[in-house]
């Protein structure tokens, strides 16, 4: 790895090349492991994005004239599996959480550094199984592995895909366990629960979901593989099994998994909004409680994915009500972000633009989620492009905006360099425009009745599909831009001081990038969280 001149060179920091590639592969430094995750997750992001572009190109015309029907089935399956399990779920916790949580609480590292490295290796092993699945023909069940399709004996690599996700799940469990123990046992003196940054609260709640929910998915996929290999009658109704059992087990994990993806993003946005509004987060305690409430309610609403699957009307009514209740803590967070910005000294920096995008797009996704929680409307739009649009407004418009915004916010701390602000703003605007042009037409398509996962469609839907495909091209450009100028900044960017944003928090009280053990001396916290009344003004353009 080429030498990179950085400030604070007297520290043996995580970018030091003294021991070469071997020191990276055997490191127990949480910051280096975060960068290993960053490289790995970025790789899978572009693989999943490539599949998405092929899907949109296929849908440019009503006729299936780019790929064959079975290939199209594999494209949307592999897109979903790669993006959900190898990008969306691990992105913020494994990259930003790994890098920042110990520093934010004043610790020298995570509680179990070797287990942290092991979690990355497990992730890579799972990723290799997924790459094997892709290169040998892929799976065609959809990312949900619905039975009895996934347990029928079609000539696709369902078992390999299930094994890939099964293995990657252990990486998620180990990371969650590490975060929980670290937050409980390694906080600096004075870092009470009421002084924890909301980013730490969000990752703590996420870790609880990972530890409790991921084993259920692992068991479910193991049962699918066993039934497929040995013809057991677990889910196959022809052998006395119950396909609804699969859906209950799968969604018991996979709906909370939505919050594994979005909760850390909420933590990122809380940090950014407070910093660039120059105010303490409005209703800090309610924000922390809302995070925990989302994690708890997330385990109680799984069956709203099954309103048309054959569950009883009474069960559907209960899950419909619970689905409305889970919107309350999310609404609290949106209200409190807005109240934080009210009469604040707002700086329109690149991270803040991503935070604005997150709040708007996440709110749009949340409101359309209420449509899906309503029994009558859900029957009409189930398995249409309305569901696709809703999911992507939450995940791509929400989580990905927060993730990229977080990378911009903490990039000076990660790399010790500043990126070009004008290019950052351009990328944020490009992503916002491209995203809405891609996915808003899909709400209309779904309401008009265009089903998802179809290779061909009626000609009257073409105009909206052309708009969606054009938007996906713009979106792709927006995603490539940050990668380009981040790499550029590592050699040519302005050297960053320890606190370029004038932000509050322990991570801004150490060198950029931090030394191996984060702090020369263990800090003692004597101030409340987000003490912006005492922080310096933001030294950036307004």
Image (cartoon, grey):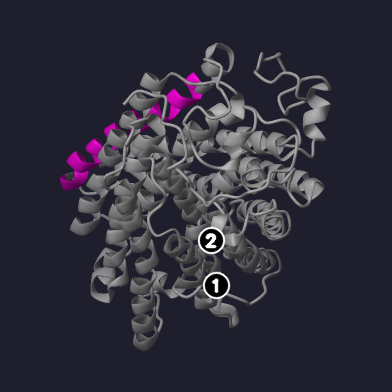
Left or right of residue 195: residue 515: right
Q: Which of 427 and 14 is in front in this view?
A: 14
Q: Is residue 138 shown to the viewer in this render?
A: no
Q: In this view, does 175 lie above or below 221?
A: above
Q: What crowding class fits label 1: few (fewer than 14 Cα within 10 Å), some (14-19), or many (20 or more)?
A: many
Residue at the bottom extreme, as displayed: 314
Residue 433 sits in which quadrant?
top left
Picture quarter with the C terminus: top left
Q: Distance between the residues labelled 1 and 2?
A: 9 Å
- Report the residue marked by disc 1: 246
Residue at the left extreme, as displayed: 460
Q: Which of 371 and 445 is in front in this view?
A: 371
- Report the residue marked by disc 2: 145
Magenta segment boundaries in residue numbering: 460-485
Left or right of residue 296: residue 30: right
Label 1: state its secondary structure: helix
The residue at the point 81 percent across, 46 percent down is 114
Q: Nearer the viewer, residue 458 or 6?
A: 6
Kindly indicate whether the residue at mark 2 contacts the one at mark 1 (C-beta within 8 angstroms): yes
Badge 1 or badge 2: first in the primary sequence: 2
């Amino acid at each position: 790895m080429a030498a990179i001149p950085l400030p604070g060179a007297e520290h043996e920091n995580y970018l030091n090349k003294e021991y070469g590639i071997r020191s990276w592969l055997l490191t127990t430094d949480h910051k280096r492991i975060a960068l290993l995750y960053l490289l790995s997750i970025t790789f899978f992001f572009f693989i999943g994005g490539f599949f998405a572009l092929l899907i949109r190109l296929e849908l440019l015309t009503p006729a299936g004239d780019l790929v064959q029907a079975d290939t199209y089935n594999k494209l949307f399956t592999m897109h979903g599996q790669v993006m959900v399990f190898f990008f969306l779920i691990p992105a913020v916790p494994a990259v930003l959480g790994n890098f920042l949580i110990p520093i934010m609480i004043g610790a020298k590292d995570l509680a179990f550094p070797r287990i942290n490295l092991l979690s990355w290796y497990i992730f890579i092993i799972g990723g290799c199984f997924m790459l094997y699945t892709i290169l040998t023909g892929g799976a065609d069940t959809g990312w949900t592995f619905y039975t009895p399709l996934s347990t029928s004996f079609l000539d696709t690599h369902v078992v390999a895909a299930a094994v890939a996700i099964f293995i990657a799940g252990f990486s998620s469990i180990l990371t969650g366990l590490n975060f929980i123990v670290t937050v409980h046992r390694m906080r600096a003196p004075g870092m009470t629960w009421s002084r924890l940054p909301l980013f730490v609260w969000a990752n703590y709640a996420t870790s609880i979901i990972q530890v409790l929910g991921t084993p259920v998915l692992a068991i479910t996929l193991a049962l699918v593989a066993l039934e497929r290999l040995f013809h057991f009658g677990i889910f196959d109704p022809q052998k006395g099994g119950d396909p609804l059992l699969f859906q209950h087990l799968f969604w018991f994990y996979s709906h909370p998994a939505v919050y594994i993806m979005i909760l850390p993003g909420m933590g990122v946005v809380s940090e950014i909004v407070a910093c660039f509004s120059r105010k303490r987060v409005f209703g800090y305690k309610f924000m922390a409680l809302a995070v925990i409430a989302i994690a708890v309610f997330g385990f109680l609403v799984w069956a709203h994915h099954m309103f048309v699957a054959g569950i009883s009307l009474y069960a559907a009514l209960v899950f419909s009500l619970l689905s409305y209740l889970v919107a309350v803590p999310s609404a609290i967070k949106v209200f409190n972000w807005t109240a934080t910005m009210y009469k604040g000294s707002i700086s329109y920096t690149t991270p803040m633009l991503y935070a604005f995008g997150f709040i708007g797009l996440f709110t749009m996704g949340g409101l359309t989620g209420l449509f899906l929680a309503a029994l009558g409307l859900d029957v009409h739009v189930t398995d249409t492009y309305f569901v696709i649009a809703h999911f992507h407004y939450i995940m791509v418009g929400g989580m990905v905006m927060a993730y990229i915004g977080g990378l911009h916010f903490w990039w000076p701390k990660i790399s010790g360099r500043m990126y070009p602000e004008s290019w950052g703003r351009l990328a944020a605007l490009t992503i916002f425009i491209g995203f809405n042009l891609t996915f808003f037409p899909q709400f209309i398509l779904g309401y008009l009745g265009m089903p998802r996962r179809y290779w061909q469609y009626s000609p009257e839907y073409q105009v909206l599909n052309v708009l969606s495909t054009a938007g996906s091209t713009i979106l792709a450009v927006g995603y490539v831009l940050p990668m380009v100028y981040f790499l550029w900044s590592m050699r040519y960017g302005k050297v960053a001081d320890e606190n370029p944003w004038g932000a509050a928090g322990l991570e801004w009280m150490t060198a950029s990038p931090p030394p191996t053990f984060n702090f020369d001396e263990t800090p003692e916290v004597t101030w409340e969280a987000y003490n912006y009344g005492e922080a310096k003004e933001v030294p950036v353009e307004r």
